[in-house]
Image: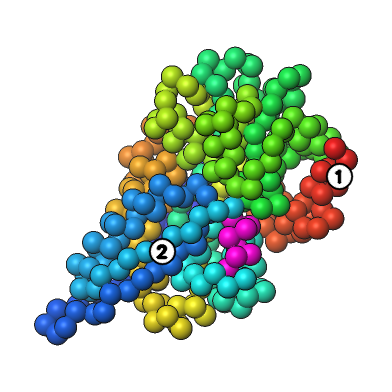
Amino acid sequence: MFDIIVKRRVFLATALVVMALPATQALAGPAPAPAVLTNVSYDPTRELYQAINPAFARWWKQRTGQDVTFRMSHGGSGAQSRAILDGLDADVATLGLAYDIDVLADKGHLLAANWQQALPGNSAPYLSTVVFLVRKGNPKGIHGWADLLKPGVQVITPNPKTSSGGRWNFLAAWAYARRAGHSDAAARGFVKQLYTHVPVLDAGARGATTTFVERGIGDVELAWESDAFLAVNKLGRDKFDIVVPQISVLGEPTVAVLTANTQRHGTTQLANGYLRFLYSPLGQTIIAQNYYRPRNPQVAAKFAHQFPKVNLVTVDKEFGGWRKAQHTFFDEGGVYDEIAASH
């Protein structure tokens, strides 16, 4: 879990960001022309931004007099990043992991290479982790990672080539197996066997949840904590249980203003205000209400009962950061491709 000192530093940085939001403008003159903001996001944030967008629009209207509406696009994080490179004209990218925005800086030149320094917490205003969503009563007795390899157990997880959730799941499984088996060879063997239990690879995390929840395929889904809570609390406490594994990965979805686009659109100030709003007390409360872990320590304390304590590893410490992890595991010819080819 987070060190108290780190929390305080993030909170102070957050406070400075929120203080930097535009002050209320005098509305003596004509109101600013209405604006449209395009947010290209990843699958599990549909409900989050359905709540964030009207709250921000009201807040922005009160402060600036400007009406704002939104265009939203959701899909697998890697697929969304490629769509932006191919011309999807986004103002902001709110994607599942940092590498998918790194690509927009490196290949698309849509923002600065040091974009993660623009906002607190490496531009990750909300957090999550990987948990197990199982059928009610846990009929297959799945209590930890090792149980996923039981004979007859079907595991639902999205494709790591297209889905950030799929990559987080892969690395969470690898981290568990490496620590349990004390070697990368043990981790490779575990993960290779795990994927023989996967009957279908959906393109995105939300598609995987649909496969498990609505289509009834599989015994356990490796799910974003937010999606698991959504399934239990909105779709039926009598249908699903959440199992928290011994160890998991700290999911850090990241957000960024695509300045090359916003400068053309005249939406740079609006886009910055939108992402900074995510760090405000109201934004953080909405984040927690939608089952993401908030950064703000006061809001986190208020919702502490909602989130189980988990032994969390980070991609930075466990895998050397997302650029290295992407190259090692998920690029063409990487570890995942070798595992997939062996099935």
Q: Which mark is residue 341?
A: 1
Tell me residue 71's x, y (percent).
Answer: 41, 64
Report the Cα–Cα distance between label 1 and label 2.
Answer: 39 Å
* Residue depicted at x 28% and y 75%: 34
Rendered image: mark on residue 71: 2
- How far across and how far down the image is residue 293, in percent? 44, 44
Q: Determine if residue 317 is in view.
A: no
Highlighted range, magenta: 77-84
Residue displayed at 70% across by 22% down = 153
Residue drawn 28% across the image and 56% down it: 55
Crowding near the residue tagged with mark 1, few <14, some 14–19, many ≥20 C-alpha atoms within 10 Å: few
- Residue 287 placement, left or right of 153: left
- Where's residue 301, x and y in %? 36, 41
Answer with left or right where residue 125 lies relative to residue 206: left
> Which amino acid type is marked by label 1?
Ala
Label 2 sits on a secondary structure element that is strand
